[in-house]
Amino acid sequence: MASVTLPPSVYTPPQACKITMMNVPANILSLPPRVIERICETLHEEQTRCSMQALVSFSRTCWAINWLAQGVLWRILPSIAPLLCTLPADLCSFSSQVTPADGTVVPSCIEFLRNPYHKDLDRFRMYAALVQEIRADLTWWPFAPVRVAPGVWSALRARGPKPLCPNLRVLQHVQELDSDTKLSPVSDNPIFMLLGPSLTSVAVDISSTLAQSLLRAISRTCPDLDSLSVRITSGQACSNPPVRALQGRSDAMHAPARRCNVYSCNLWGLIDLTVVKLVGIYVAPDALSYLGNLPHIRILEFDVHCDDLLWDAPHEKHDKRFSSLESLKVRTNRFEWCTVFLETITSCRLQVLSLVCLERPAPFIVMRGLCEAVGAGPWREKLHTLEIISGRAEDRRYRIQGYPPVDFMGPLLTLPALRRFALYGRCKVMYGDATLEAMKDAWPGIEHLDLRNPLEDHRIEDQVRRESDMTASTQKARLNEQCERQNTPSMISL
């Protein structure tokens, strides 16, 4: 087989890990390098993921086939479980998957039978250096779901490479997959062992008790990070899915038992961020100012509790605040703060805007101010997707808030590029023939228009129907015809 020159970042297998040529099948060695690489790529394709167990046996038997092909084979993993399967048989125990009669899935578990020696991890280090992406994926059988015993993480922290995968660039981590809630101290948590200077993208679901420590660790160890997504998981959030199911279009504001805040000191060092998503983490004023000064942020999603901020000045105005923003999603408990915040954004590139307030439906005066801020922003020529959620649709503690069409829709008619617009929650726009005609003229490219409330009070719904059913049906047909003429898919729901 032709020799291959390895790039400096690729780990060359140590002599101690080499297998004698007598153990390498001759038919494998006779294949062209590109064919071998294609075999490795096949193991990662969706239709062949059921054969992921072949990854370990194929690599351990055929290490000499082509080291670049091995890089393809190990580039993407669903977890570190495949790496653990390369350890000596007398060290690692992989329990079998058992499914009880009631259909409950009992995860497999990986445990160490003894304390590992340094040489036991030689092969682990060799393959770990090839891993570039770890993506939590429950479809990669049999390595998901797989639980790793706490003692394994402690042993890897003491004797394994630091970080565990030194060339890792993309990390997706779900806390439940690794049982890391049982680990103590925090530094033993597996997510901290995977952080390193090569990371450019991190997306994790983690408990509120670890969020601040995780953000500080990321800011210290990942200077080149450009995408950061942290979602707080909690028993309440997991056991209460109706809002997400009923609203369907937006994440509900999480309410973890232990409130988690992020401050600017948790983000220092992350100056190249382009994507920031903080779900269930409340952004403090100084952290919001820090993010606003970053020059490359394109996508921003965060939670904010306006009681923590000055309503009349969430932060100082700046000529280049959020200057590159293209997508913004804010979850808050008051829309008044959102109105002021939108006035501080200087980006003219904003194309997607989602504003969520699930605490209670906003009064029409507040909603009018919010719509005026949306329609008057420097992005008005570019904005093509707008989503507003005002209150929880199923929360019957509050009456459905009706919004007059002039106050609500008028400011939004200045958005000529709008293609998708939706209003959800405990609210209703009292639209009529004139309103729908104005929308048709102001939004020539409209593809998706949804002003429905799926759980609204039927008495109010009947009243609205009696007043506007005929005119609304006519205008809805016209909007659909307009979409058909432009050969665009349409979803007009009123």
Image (cartoon, rainbow, N blue to C red):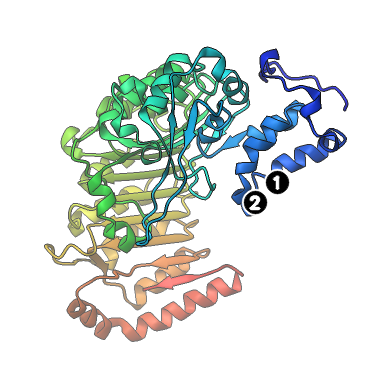
- What amino acid does circle 1 point to? Thr
Residue 92 drawn at (x, y percent): 49, 29
Left or right relative to 308: residue 174: right
Q: Which residue in the protein does label 2 denote?
A: 48
Position of residue 46 relative to residue 468, above or below, is above
Q: Which residue is pictured at 32% across the width and 56% down the height?
A: 388
- What amino acid does circle 2 point to? Thr
For marks 1 and 2 on the same chain, the one whose residue lies earlier in the sequence:
1
Residue 211 drawn at (x, y percent): 31, 30
Identify the secondary structure beneath mark 1: helix
Position of residue 20 relative to residue 328, above or below, is above
* Furthest residue in direction front, as rendered: 90
Mark carried by residue 131: none
Residue 227 drawn at (x, y percent): 48, 32
Residue 79 drawn at (x, y percent): 50, 36
Left or right relative to 65: residue 111: left
Mark carried by residue 42: 1
Q: Which residue is pictured at 35% across the width and 86% down the height?
A: 470
Of 90 and 53, the residue lying toward us: 90
Q: Which residue is pictured at 47% across the width and 70% down the height?
A: 491
Of 205 and 457, the residue lying toward us: 205
Quadrant of the image occupied by residue 44? top right
Q: Are marks 1 and 2 in contact (CB under 8 Å)?
A: yes
Does residue 356 show up? Answer: yes
In the rendered image, which quarter contains the C terminus?
bottom left
Position of residue 52 relative to residue 160, above or below, is below
